[in-house]
Image: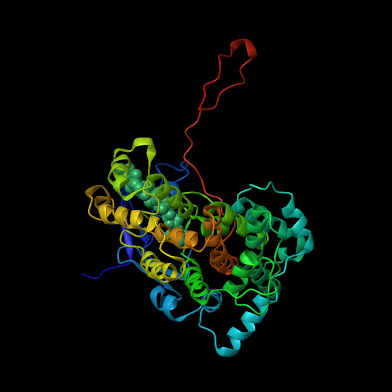
Amino acid sequence: MATKDTLTVTDNRTGKTYELAVKDGCIRTADLRQIKVDEKDFGLMGYDPAFLNTANCRSAITFIDGDKGILEYRGYPIEQLAEKSSFLEVAYLLLNGELPTKQEIDEFTYIITHHTYVHENIKSFMDGFRYDAHPMSMLASTVAALSSFYPDAKNIKDRTTRRIQMMRLIAKMPTIAAFSYRHSMGLPYVYPDNELSYVGNYLAMIRKIGTATYKPNPILERALDVLFILHADHEQNCSTTATRIVGSSQVDPYSAVTAGITALYGPLHGGANEAVLRMLREIGHVSRVPEFIKQVKSGEGEKKLMGFGHRVYKSYDPRAKVIKQQADKVFEVTGKNPLLDIATELERIALQDDYFVKRKLYPNVDFYSGLIYEAMGFPAEMFPVLFAIPRTVGWVAQWEEMVLDEEQKIARPRQVYTGHPRRDYAPMEKRTSGARP
Ligand code: SDX
């Protein structure tokens, strides 16, 4: 029988049938609007809270197969990039679609290296935060403030202007992140060092105290470079979607990326790496793992096994595998993080416990990363910042793809109205105490 790429639906309210085109495994939800009970009917909409089954865009940047645990950047498997590439080379790939030639990566590296400084006023801006301000809050506020330093960033349709803002964001994120760390430690800011690599420079701006130069440990520098590769992009996750949605109003990229930072801050997203460490500290000892698992399964206190589960991966997150390998290399330098035993015992029990198996809950990118960051001397509050730095590449690459996508326009979803039907204004004497949501 000849098959057609269409869906035939029958509206049982009217007996009418409709043929909807199927392309790339999707129907256009707008095609549902023709399905009406009468001419006054608005027509059918799709209802999909939290977008569990909705494609918001067409993208060529990152591919994920959640069932097979596959992650590819521009077609290259994440495992190969983690083993053979560098973060700036992966950044070039995500932004431009191809791996760079020697000349291209040298030019790209030069541009990034020479845009790491921030305006001196940024320092006084950051000095206004309390000593105990969360670095993600400082990062989001300061990146938002950057848009006031580059008013021409609003010209998002001009490629040259657009691209220089994207380079500035990638280059300055480590500087602002390091400044937020130094501020919280009461230490003087360390200026970028153009002689160091992207990651080495970040480590120097974090660690340098009282010395003219700083030489990062090459094993730690490489481990963080690999972690940055793993965190660079992840298709339409919560923070990237926030960046795209805010960017769809044609605001400048600094403001759009601020939306990404604040979305990433949440404990269900990039804030999970910080929550994992707090969870491991709360468990405190391997012997208390069974009790904790029991509390999670019983729903007691709405406890979750942080660092487990994923909206897309219904198998082991391929990034978690690579991170676990990196942990062994880091611990050879720093000494093993004692919380690792609790983490591996949690994983061992969860991977065989029906509650987690049935819900296809596996370790995700955030489960082991915090152990590495803590072993490298970062406080837990800095963990989501260490996620935001590399994810800036994904945010700006996806933002630019949205800007250039002729199908895209300002994002403005509809709703299912569940409120009061129309009613007249009530005079005071006729009112009763208001209902509370
Ligand atoms: C990231 O989207 C991305 O790509 C994100 C990311 C990226 O690179 O951008 O990969 C980075 O954010 C990774 C996820 C980090 N977050 C956490 O580790 C927090 C803990 N995980 C959960 O909150 C949860 O798994 C989510 C938020 C990650 C996914 O949530 P979903 O897809 O909405 O799944 P759900 O909440 O509907 O859970 C389905 C079931 C529920 O049980 P039932 O109601 O069916 O009985 O699984 C349970 C949930 O209660 N469940 C968990 C759990 N995660 C889900 N139970 C215990 N512990 C967990 N971690």
Residue at (66%, 81%) from the top-left corner?
110
In depth, the one of 165 and 175 nearer the eye is 175
Residue 298 horizontal/vertical position (percent): 29, 38
In depth, the one of 13 and 329 nearer the eye is 329
Left or right, residue 17 beside residue 212: left
Task: List the single residue furthest toward the left.
Answer: 1
Residue at (30%, 61%) from the top-left corner?
315
Residue 433 horizontal/vertical position (percent): 56, 16
Left or right, residue 164 beside residue 34: right
On screen, 239 above or below 152?
A: above
In depth, the one of 172 and 209 nearer the eye is 209
On screen, 160 above or below 233?
A: below
Residue at (48%, 44%) from the top-left corner?
42
Quadrant the N terminus occupies: bottom left
Task: List the single residue furthest toward the top.
Answer: 429
Left or right, residue 175 beside residue 329: right
